[in-house]
Amino acid sequence: MKRILKHFWVYLSFLLLLTACEKGIDFDLEEAEPKLVVEATIENGQAPRVVLTNSLAYFATLNPQQLANSFVRNAEVTISNGSKSHKLKEYAVNLAPGFNLYYYSIDSSNLSTAFTGELATSYTLRIVTNGREYNAQTTIPAITKRLDSVWWKDAPATVDTTKAIVMIRATDKGGYGDYVRYYTKRNSEPFLPGLNSVFDDLFIDGTTYELQVEPGWNRSFEREEEDAFFSKGDTVTLKLSAIDKATYDFWRTMEYSYASVGNPFSTPVKIDGNISGGALGYFGGYGSLYRTIVIPR
């Protein structure tokens, strides 16, 4: 008992010492100039799509009006495939009364220079706004992975019996340097990327392999354990997209950053974008294929 009391008083003295040594520190954080944030994509068979916003202060209290005001309007956005250059048009999507989302895509009044994405094709993007110019380049790679089969099986016995796992068997073409990003769609929901959605072929180059496909995750919500499984009765569509190295690096570092949020022991993460001129974000090309499976109840 005396030994326990001795340890207790040593511990209490240590706490008092730490308290006595505390000193208030105030940080005077300067307001950084907002940066242009670019989310630009082009997919095989699809029109280019570009969303431009201004970055927000790190400690800003977000509200719908602030988010609505962050969109960059009236920018000059041009995309080229090497033979055609097309000036994109700004469009608005009404989200709620008084709140719009703005994006740039093909100008339907000038289709003579318009084009959609093609496999094994490179593209350049030029953005001019507020007197500054930004540039980026991407490629829609050829599709190098073959989806041989897609099937489902029951989730482990420790999980709800109404849950199911989706599996794939795929073959990777020989030769390193192939990168993919995957998404899933359940029923009428939108396509969502997986928790870890990008992969290289470092360990599976030139092989045929089997892999569990986890459902895509809406990062606006906290992920629960059951989110790792589909439900019986779901119609599941898998989207598998070939991407280039720059797009892979952007999403690899972005998802590492997601995983680090709230972890006091994590190291700072630099997001690897590919937009010149000091802008944030990326311009990515996607060579996509789709497979659908219906999981019976």
Image (spheres, helix red, strand yellow):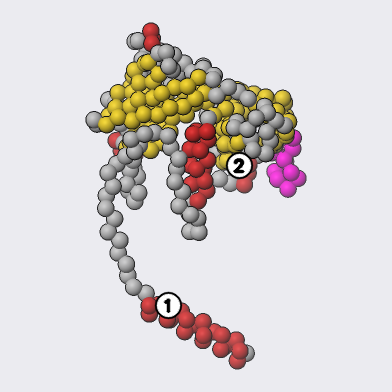
Q: Do the numbered discs 2 and 1 sit on residues whose CB atoms are within 8 Å?
A: no
Q: On screen, 9 above or below 218?
A: below
Identified at 45% across, 43% down, the residue is: 271
In the rendered structure, which amino acid carries the disc numbered 2?
Asp
In reply to whether residue 162 is colored magenta, the answer given is: yes
Residue nearest the observer in this picture, 193 or 111: 111
Residue furthest front in the image: 175
Q: Residues within 10 Å of mark 2 (few under 14, many from 20)?
A: some
Residue 4 lies, in percent from the top left, at 60, 86
- Residue 14's place in the image compared with 223, above or below, is below
The circle drawn on residue 227 is 2
Q: Is residue 128 toward the left or the right of residue 155 in the image? A: left
- Asked if one can make out residue 175 in the rendered structure from this viewpoint, the answer is yes
Helix, strand or loop status at disc 2: helix
Q: CA distance from mark 2 to mark 1?
A: 43 Å
**Which portion, as a residue range, is magenta?**
153-164
Residue 40's spot in the image, x, y percent? 42, 28
Q: Image point 70% across, 45% down: which residue? A: 159
Give the residue displayed 41% in from the left and 23% down from the top: 124
Residue at the image point whose x is 51% and y is 82% from the top: 11
Q: Residue 95: which disc?
A: none
* Residue ID for mark 1: 18
